[in-house]
Image (cartoon, coloured by chain):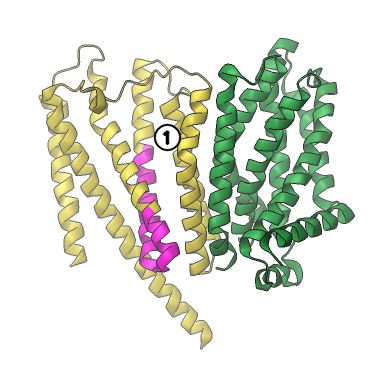
Chain colours: A green, B yellow
Amino acid sequence: MSGFSAAIAIASKDLRTELRTKESLNSAASFALVILVLFSFAFDLGRDEFLAISGGLLWLVYAFAGALIVNRSFARELPNDCLDILIASPAPGWAIFLGKAFASFLLLMIVELISLPVFGVFYNVPWVDSFFPLLLIMVLATWGITIAGSAFSAVTVNVRLRELMLPVLLYPLLIPLLTAAMEMTTALMNGESLGGSNSGGLRILTAFDAIFTALAVYLIEYILVL
Amino acid sequence: MREKLILTLGSLGTVLMLWVIYRVFLGLPAEILQGDIYRIIFIHVPAAITAYCLYGVAVIASVGFLIKRNFVMDSLAVSCVEVAQVFTLVNLVTGSIWGRIIWGIWWTWDLRLTSQLMCFLLYLGYLLLRPAVSDPTQRGVMSAILAIFAAADIPLVVMAIRLKNVRTQHPQPVLETGGLDPSFVAPFVVSMVALMLIGTALVLIRLQQESTRREIDSLRRELHAV
């Protein structure tokens, strides 16, 4: 079994488990909705003011939901020592890791695609016209969140207070990615395009994805086989 | 032998620092634009440079630990990070005091200030993670990986803050622009040397504590086995 087919097998296993139990999908999606509603109590803004911070709010929701999803990614394998069995299997470490990261990526994308229209409806934000550029940002930034998140999920899987430790470690690391995604999403919501002065964010997202995918794939053997 | 080294480095650093304090507060005149508050630069900048050097050593030691699995490397990394955090805090606090006088505000989300704070937060996670892991090898590998991830993140943080087009109000680095008055050079360089010596002494003290801690841990484990 080659590495890539092992990765696909792991990803489909994770997705199948998740779609049957829906434990992290349901909680992440409803958590995102609750946070979206909370914003309306936290801020009392006019439409222009709201548009100016819309990207920031949206990505805060996604980052919170992302931490919930990646937290389960490796923790799910703890009962019955499944993680040890996965590590002992012929699948290489990077394939296990990429498979899990890809499953988390798809789950987080589902949560994001559910909460985006809700965000648009609740706050009268024009996202439909710029949906495809927005989708590009979402794909790039979500991959960054899940790849760094899955790496830290693997690092913290055996740690006390895992649920608390993961966000404390993950969010500072995600700041460049979130800043870029927030800036570009706000620009899109205000009717600007991704080209010209806004293209710097795309470069940061691509650089983040490339650097952390490479680092995580390279270091994952050290993380898994301690 | 090691005690003597620590004592020599520490007292040499202290004597040099006393000379710097004497020179800065009693020898040098007030600066024409900033008045007396400029004197803070003789602590502010050397503290930052010392912190960067220590973070650098910590990352190299972390890579070394992953390759060699030598626990001295792990101890060196954590000692360097702890001392570097202290120097970063000195840098942040002195900068904040300077900003209160010159800018009229304690803090602004400027490129240099924000990236320095991010550096502090990233390695704060490093220090938080360590006590949460009980197995020494596991602790070493996890923190080494975190140190490497944090180091890879810092250039991205700088790029991302530039996106926001904040015009920096922070003075240009005097070392690069050559704006340092000849009479300032000696106290500046001596202060840097003094802080490096004190930093090295602190790292050596922490290294000793770490090796004692390791010894106690192994004795305790032996006791448990019996």
* Residue B78 position in % (x across, y down): 40, 56
Quadrant where the N terminus of chain B is found in the figure: bottom left
In magenta, the rendered stretch is B60-89
- Tell me the quarter of the picture where residue B191 sits: top left
The answer to whether residue B194 is visible is yes
Q: Which residue is mark 1?
A: B116
Residue at 63% over, 65% down: A92
Who's the residue at 85% across and 56% down the image? A16
Query: Residue A183, image x and y in percent?
Result: 61, 24
Secondary structure, magenta segment, majority class: helix
* Residue A110: x %, y % from top left: 81, 40
| Left or right of A149 in this view: A23 | right
Judging from the image, what secondary structure is the residue with disc 1 in? helix
Residue shown at 18% from the left, 53% from the top:
B9
Q: Amino acid at mark 1?
A: Gln
Q: Quadrant of residue A177?
A: top right
Residue A46 visible in the shown view: no
Vertical arrangement, residue B27 with respect to residue A174, above or below: above
User: Which residue is pictured at 81% across the width and 23% down the height?
Assistant: A120
Can you name the residue that lies furthest to the front here?
Answer: A2
Callout 1: chain: B
Give above or below for B94 relative to A208: above
- Asked if the stretch drawn in magenta spans residue B66, the answer is yes
